[in-house]
Image: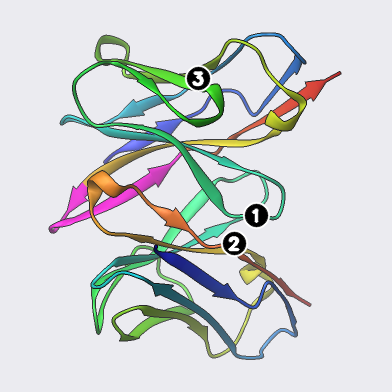
Amino acid sequence: AQSVTQPDIHITVSEGASLELRCNYSYGATPYLFWYVQSPGQGLQLLLKYFSGDTLVQGIKGFEAEFKRSQSSFNLRKPSVHWSDAAEYFCAVVTSSGGSYIPTFGRGTSLIVHP
Amino acid sequence: SQTIHQWPATLVQPVGSPLSLECTVEGTSNPNLYWYRQAAGRGLQLLFYSVGIGQISSEVPQNLSASRPQDRQFILSSKKLLLSDSGFYLCAWSGGLTYGYTFGSGTRLTVV
């Protein structure tokens, strides 16, 4: 069965510092990968997605992620964090089940930004 | 453009009472629909998904049920709530894999 691991429950960075959020997946076939962001009490917003092709994917709000098949990873990065980036971040792998595509989410990483 | 509506935003219900959460999608047809529950620090747990009217797949056995009476309407129900049903419930839709998944704003359910 597919699974997603986000090993860091909390990450604290200073504003202006670089950021990397880790995501590892377990899936036998070619994965479809997503990163979502959730502000407190809100739904999830799509940051970026990877299906195939270029392994470096650009998303909204200055985020990017790199797919590394050899490491089963899809880490999210941002060169300079803003205070408004403080939120919960979820990595997801989408797999096929009976003709439907089902997202499986990691447990999330809470990003804290210090001024 | 497509929009997803979820209500109510917050709900406080006593143990043993029934539940009905509604989710509707506008601006698309035949969407795939999903119900997730988010407990504190535990990520998102898929509860139900639906690929069409009357077609419901359950991922986790529990006292919750889902129905899809219309193409763009997805309802989460319970006959008798448990304390453990408390959480943040999210509805999502997808028009296909390449479109990704769009989430509603969620319902905070507190069972007391």
Tag 3's secondary structure? Answer: loop
Q: Which mark is residue A42?
A: 1
As shown in the figure, which amino acid type bears the numbered disc 3? Arg
Q: Is residue A34 magenta?
A: no
As shown in the figure, which amino acid type bears the numbered disc 2? Ser
Q: CA distance from mark 3 to mark 2?
A: 25 Å
Q: Main secondary structure of the magenta part?
A: strand
Q: CA distance from mark 1 to mark 3?
A: 22 Å
- Tell me whether the residue at label 1 lies in contact with that at label 2, contact meaning CB atoms closer than 8 angstroms: yes
Pick whichever of labels 1 and 3 is earlier in the sequence: 3
Using the rendered view, name the quadrant where residue B20 is placed. bottom right
Q: Quadrant of the C terminus of chain B?
A: bottom right
Q: Quadrant of the N terminus of chain B?
A: bottom left
Using the rendered view, name the quadrant where residue A3 is placed. top left
Magenta residues span A96-105
Disc 2 target residue: B105
Q: Residues within 10 Å of mark 1 (few under 14, many from 20)?
A: some
Disc 1 versus disc 3: nearer the observer: 1
Q: Residue furthest right?
A: A115
Say above or below: A96 vs A53.
Answer: below
Which chain letter goes with mark 1? Answer: A
Say above or below: B77 vs A73.
Answer: below
Q: Is residue A100 magenta?
A: yes
Counting from the top left corner in percent of width and height, residue B60 is at 40, 64
Tag 1's secondary structure? Answer: loop
Q: Residue furthest front?
A: B1
Disc 3 versus disc 2: nearer the observer: 2
